[in-house]
Amino acid sequence: MATLPRPAQPAPAPLLEVIEPLLNVPQAAKILGISQCTLRNWIKRKKIARVKVGGRVMFRPDTIREFIAYNTRPASG
């Protein structure tokens, strides 16, 4: 009796997408070109989204990119 070849197994789907490391306040402030104090004020005024990890305030890199894109205005000519 002839045996049929087995179909190729599909690659397993990743359980999680690749997650970029979160940024802390000093890192995010440096990227934005502002002081840590200004960034903390923005957090208090809810001007920028943040992630709380225990007692630490962190930022997703996508949040920083979106914040920059949203607040970028074209030059008027």
Image (cartoon, rainbow, N blue to C red):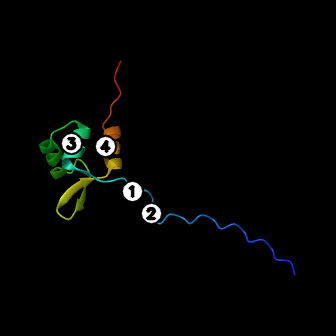
Q: Nearer the viewer, mark 4 or mark 3?
A: 3
Question: Closest to the observer: 3 or 45?
Answer: 3
For the N terminus, which image quadrant? bottom right
Query: Within 10 Å of the Cα at label 3, are there few (<14), some (14-19), or many (20+) other Cα atoms?
Result: some
N-term mark: 3 or 2: 2
N-term mark: 1 or 3: 1
User: Disc number at residue 19?
Assistant: 1
Circles 1, 2 touching at the beta carbon (< 8 Å): yes
Residue 76: % across, % down: 34, 22
Mark 4 secondary-structure assignment? helix
User: Disc number at residue 29?
Assistant: 3
Q: Quadrant of residue 6?
A: bottom right
- Could you tell me the amino acid type at mark 3? Ala
User: Disc number at residue 16?
Assistant: 2
User: Disc number at residue 67?
Assistant: 4
Give the side of residue 5 with respect to residue 59, left or right.
right
Residue 35: % across, % down: 15, 39
Q: Residue at x 59, y 64 (%)?
A: 11
Q: Nearer the viewer, mark 1 or mark 3?
A: 1
- Report how far apart the C-alphas of labels 4 and 3 lie in the structure: 12 Å
